[in-house]
Image: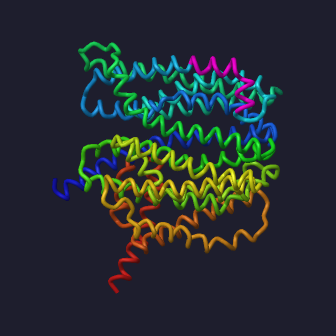
Amino acid sequence: MSVNKNSEYIGEAAKLSANAALTLFLGDFTYNLVLALGSIAIARILGSEGYGVFSLALIPPQTLALLTSLGIDIGVARYLQRYSIEKQYKQIIQIVKASILLRIAIGIIGTTICYFYSETLSSVLVNRPGIGSLVKITAIVVFLQLIYNLLLNVFIGFNSFQATSIMKITYSVFKTATSIILLLLGFGVIGALFGNILGYTASLLPAAILVYRNIKRVNQYNTSNNGINLYTLIVLLKYSLPLYMGSLTGIILSIYQNVLLSYSLSEVYIGGYRAMYNFMGLISIITTPISLALLPFFTRFDDSGKERLDKALNMANKYVALIIIPITMISMVFSKELMYILYGREYMFTSIYLPLLFAPNLLAGLGSIAIPTMFNGIGATKYNMYLSITNALVFIPTSYLLTYRFNYGLWGFLTSTLFSSVITTALAIYLSKKFVYNPINIKLIGGFYIASIVSIIPIIPVFYIHVPRLITLIRLLVGGIIYLLIYIGIAIVLNCINNDDVDFIVNTFKNYPIINVFLKIFAKYANLILRLVDREKRL
């Protein structure tokens, strides 16, 4: 295939994935915004200690849901994508039915275990035997979370990104509304837990209807028997089990983290940490849609040569770096303002930890998002298992020493998280060289990092001005806008952004009126800087 055709194919695939990412972004933005507002309200009403108990009570059912997932969620999304491209309608229907029935059976078993062993689980997993009755209330979450996560990936496999957004928004709205109502009625932690359960339940009803519609649409092209055969499950599990083994390592790591924090921190600090961790939603609004959209993007290059996959990975890394790095830096720089505006003075003691919490997201420019997704997209799932194991092997000893042994608390815990993330990303880059020539364009990505750091300097003086909360919000907005404008300008000067990038972004999202308004402003500003830079070069 010629170079031009190569670039055209990759560009078209990127455009389709970018559109998918935008659809997911709009849904995830609303979803995370509602959840964030709900979390803020719950945290404010319960206080840091009550919020800590609420968070701890959800850990046992969520852990069981992860333990029994078998990794089939991503497998379902991938095979639905592939079977749709190949127009294998019989396999599409079989994979959906098999995964749902398997997940229902596992969910019932997991819920039963959580209910009858609630006190044991609360003692072992979170070192709080006194919350066994609360864990018993949340046992149904095992079943609901398993079905919820599966259906989200079914919609991604069908390219029904609007359905994904509808499901997530329904969950967030019902969870937030019912939790706040029950809290205001005086039900305390129990009310917040029931709100979470009702959110899952409400979201599954429209999801079931939308799945039925997708199956009905596919079935009109299918004339074969739609029964489930053993081969369907074997194919799905063969792909998914390496993912599951990798996630199993992550689950064990999650259990270890919960135990470590429960032994090292009081309920007040656990509540503060959970409230602080909600800010990761600010980053996940962007990272989650991009990661999900990159899976079908890389699936298109499953059987391609190294050259095409290399270009695809570099394109993905470039646009991930362009977006994620400045957003992460803004969140780190304005961490105190974010905590003060949203949670108030009671939670301000956690603001000093926020930059360290956000720091691992800076590795996105080095492939921490794109490379693992590429492994999944091309079917090399065992490499993500290696990454998960490595992350655990690095994090467990370092976090034990820094958090518990040397008693550094959250400082030690978050430092260990960053250190293990750096090691894991370095390994991902090394492993990716089996499939691509040059996984990271150091000169290009380095320019984004330089631009993001230099752009902080002009806004430093504003932090020495003590202002009330309203003005703090304005400072956050104005400072963020100034930062982004400077960042774009420096990135252009360093040749990280060119005319083709501006045209690609604008043309990709031209059919989205609201987004298009902001993109036109971005395009005018970027094109102005590009003309000035070009004029200087000619002179």
The reply to whether residue 341 is visible in this rendering is: no
User: Is residue 119 shown above or below 162?
Assistant: above
Magenta residue check for 114: yes
Left-right relation of 446 to 200: left
User: Is residue 390 shown above or below 203?
Assistant: below
Residue furthest left in the image: 1
Q: Residue at x 57, y 17 (%)?
A: 108
Where are the magenta residues, as a range?
108-124
The reply to whether residue 197 is visible in this rendering is: yes
Task: Compare residues 401 and 452 and report the one nearer the observer.
Answer: 401
Q: Residue at x 57, y 52 (%)?
A: 394
x, y (%) of residue 39?
A: 70, 40
x, y (%) of residue 374?
A: 38, 47
Residue 477's quadrant in the figure? bottom right
Task: Compare residues 441 and 205 and report the one nearer the observer.
Answer: 441
The overriding secondary structure of the stretch rendered in magenta is: helix
